[in-house]
Image (tube, rainbow, N blue to C red):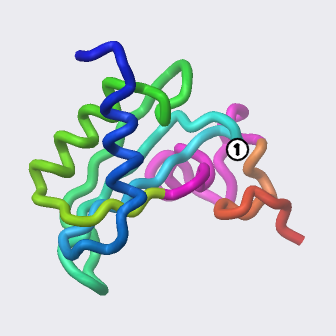
Amino acid sequence: MPTNDRFLKRLKKKAKRVMRGWPAAAIAFYGPNLSRATKVAVGIVPSEDAEPLEMRDWQVETGDVRTDVAVAGEILEFIESQGVLTVIMTDGIMGCPHQQGIDYEGEWCPSPDCAFWHGRDRFTGKPIQ
């Protein structure tokens, strides 16, 4: 695996392009707060108004998944293997890395690591009033 960040640059470049057709890869980042992403999820959407057919996620225990060269390389390999023409990537972190109904039941994740998200909007990070 290269030690430089060429995979990260390629992934960001693909996400900056305009809609080039289907299938599309939807990439979302999740983390315990707004500054550190510990999980990235990638869904392959075959056509407009369709649900993702293929889903994969990657997690890191330390550091930030957005700067992990190995993860970026695996994401590129995954989206290229699916024939993706368009990459759509979130700008920020979209909430806790745990999945409601899978990792926990209830309104908020019980993990102390995710306390930041209690009472916050997952898309903006701002408190819900």
Q: Residues within 10 Å of mark 1 (few under 14, many from 20)?
A: some
Q: Nearer the viewer, residue 15 or 68?
A: 15
Q: Residue at x 27, y 65 (%)?
A: 86
| Residue 30: in magenta span | no
Q: How many marks?
A: 1
Q: Reply above or below: 77 against 124.
A: above
Residue sitting farthest toward the bottom: 49
Which quarter of the image is occupied by the C terminus?
bottom right
Please tell me whether mark 1 sits on a helix, a strand or a loop: loop
Quadrant of res 88? bottom left
- Which residue was labeled with disc 1? 34
59 versus 3 height, above or below = below
Residue located 83% across and 67% down the image: 128
* The magenta segment: 90-115
Which amino acid type is marked by label 1? Leu
Residue 104 counted in the magenta span: yes
Quadrant position of residue 4: top left
31 on left or right of 46: right
Q: In the image, 59: left or right of 50?
A: right
Report x, y in % for residue 42: 33, 52
**Quadrant location of the N terminus?**
top left
Residue in the foreground of this view, choosing between 53 and 83: 83
Q: Is residue 71 left or right of residue 85?
A: right
Q: Position of residue 100 (x, y in %)?
A: 53, 56
Q: Position of residue 101 (x, y in %)?
A: 48, 58
Residue closest to the eye, 117 or 6: 6
* Residue drawn where x is 81% and y is 60% of the image: 126
